[in-house]
Amino acid sequence: MAEFGGFPEDFFVFLQELKDNNNRDWFNTNKNRYYESVVNPIGAFIVSIAPRLKKISRHYIADPKPHGGSMFRIYRDTRFSKDKSPYKTHAGVQFRHEAGKNAHAPGFYVHLADDELVFGGGIWQPPGPQLNRIREYIADNSRSWARIRNATKVKEVGGIKGDSLKRPPQGFDAQHVHIEDLKRKSFYVMTEASPEIALKPGFIDEVTEAFRRAAPLTRFITGALDLPF
């Protein structure tokens, strides 16, 4: 199997043009280009990173199928949005835990846009019961959590992030040493980079390193949810 050599130049060009032509007529006219410049390269990336991901954890899935696999659909869900544009103007890939059924599962993630490139791992807006279990696990394992959040490699990319409540969650000590983390609704460690690096052969190495950096956090989260890592 050939190593992934980077995304084609037209990958980001297509996404830029989609911003200016976010309608079904333009997309249908350029659908073959979408598959050639976006879908197929993402599939090749997923295939190439799969054995690397398996070395981090064999419980996270790398599925190159264009529909129902690790790649997110390009179609937006506009049912509850004022913005009725039909297509996303970025590409997303989530390598979620085998026990997960949607984007709210623990996982590793790559976000590709012409103006933003981020990749790493964690969990995004888990449902209330799972979120509460993660918070309880943090509260009960303060030392382990401190080692993860204070690790040099984590601090190098800005630490553990995620949207937060304005006030401490109900049932948790407002004076807890990790109260700011207990207020979070998501937990992730992400690396930001210039989109141009996605076009280069070394991109897959950058992503692999970011996944390794996020692995202790992801391991902690799966432990909180009684899942294998």
Image: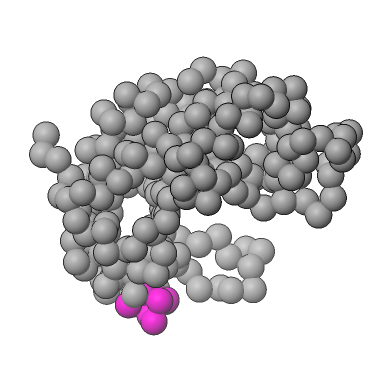
Residue farthest along the left direction in this orientation: 2
Question: Is 219 on the left-hand or right-hand side of 14?
Answer: right
Residue farthest along the bottom direction in this orientation: 20
Q: Residue at x 56, y 73 (%)?
A: 84
Numbered-mark total: 0
Residue 71 makes an appearance in the image = yes
Residue 32 makes an appearance in the image = no
Question: Is 45 on the left-hand or right-hand side of 191?
Answer: left
Q: Residue at x 19, y 66 (%)?
A: 9
Q: Position of residue 107 (x, y in %)?
A: 48, 36
Seen from the viewer's position, the closer of residues 39 and 166 is 166
Seen from the viewer's position, the closer of residues 113 and 32 is 113
Q: Position of residue 74 (x, y in %)?
A: 41, 59
Q: Position of residue 163 (x, y in %)?
A: 67, 53
Does the magenta-highlighted stretch encompass residue 19? yes
Q: What's the image's color scheme?
A: one colour
Q: Quadrant of residue 127?
A: top right
Q: Residue at x 37, y 58 (%)?
A: 193
Q: Which residues are magenta?
A: 17-23
Q: Residue at x 19, y 56 (%)?
A: 200
Does the magenta-highlighted stretch encompass residue 70? no
**Image quadrant in which the N terminus is located:** top left
Q: Is residue 54 above or below residue 174?
A: above
Q: Is residue 39 above or below residue 128?
A: below
Q: Is residue 173 above or below residue 21?
A: above
Q: Position of residue 208 (x, y in %)?
A: 32, 39
Q: Quadrant of residue 82?
A: bottom right
